[in-house]
Image (cartoon, rainbow, N blue to C red):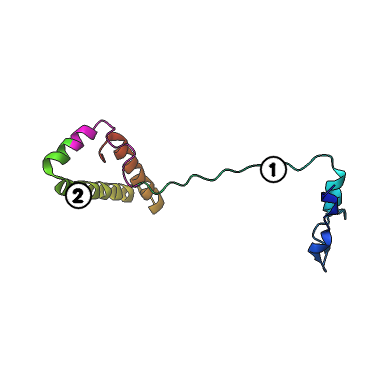
Amino acid sequence: MATSSISANVLSSSFHGSWGTSIAGEDYSAMLAKSSVAPTWVKVGTPLCYGPMMGNVNEGKGVFAPLVVVTRNIVGKKRFNQLRGKAIALHSQVINEFCKTIGADTKQKQGLIRLAKKNGEKLGFLA
C-alpha cells in the first residue's frame, strides 16, 4: 500500500521521538497499514457570506406600516425622519427612567431597548 511507505522520520523530534508515534509507541503509518478501514473525507461547502443588511426586514409589514408610509409621503422623508428620531429619543428616555426606577443595570437596559426596536419593526413603526 502507498500509505505504508510514508516515513514518519520526516517529522521527527529530539524530545519525544517522531510526531507520527502514538502514546502506545505505535507508528501512525503502521496503524493505517494494519487497519482495513480507509479514512473517510468530508466535503465542506463554501460558506455563504451576505453583506450587512441596512434596513428593516419587515419593510411594509405590520399593523402600523401603512400609516407610517402615508405619513412619510405627506410630511416628506426628511421631516419624517426628524420626527421619527425625536420619537425614538423620547421612547429611549422613558426606558432609561423606567430602568432607573426599578434599579436595572446597563445590560438589562440595553436589552429592553433592543426589544423595543424589535417590537417596533414587527408592528411596522420602522417601515
Mark found first going from the N terminus, 2 or 1: 1
Spatial CA distance of label 2 from label 1 is 57 Å
Residue 49: give x, y in percent of width and height: 46, 47
Asked if the stretch drawn in magenta spans residue 65, the answer is yes
Which circle marks residue 41 in the picture? 1
Asked if the stretch drawn in magenta spans residue 112, the answer is no
Q: Is 6 situated above or below 74?
A: below
Residue 40: give x, y in percent of width and height: 72, 41
Q: Is 27 situated above or below 72?
A: below
Please identify the dominant SS of the magenta region: loop
Q: Residue furthest left?
A: 74
Q: Amino acid at mark 2?
A: Lys
- Stretch in magenta: 54-69
Q: Residue at x 85, y 48 (%)?
A: 31
Residue 90: give x, y in percent of width and height: 22, 48
Q: Secondary structure at mark 2?
A: helix
Which circle marks residue 86 in the picture? 2
The local crowd at label 2, few if under 14, some if 14 to 19, many if 20 or more residues have their Cα within 10 Å, is few
The part of the image, by quadrant, that contains residue 67 is top left
Residue 10: give x, y in percent of width and height: 80, 63
The part of the image, by quadrant, that contains residue 64 is top left
Q: Residue furthest top?
A: 63
The local crowd at label 1, few if under 14, some if 14 to 19, many if 20 or more residues have their Cα within 10 Å, is few
Which of 7/60 is in front? 7
Q: Residue at x 60, y 43 (%)?
A: 44
The C terminus: image quadrant: top left
Q: Secondary structure at mark 1?
A: loop
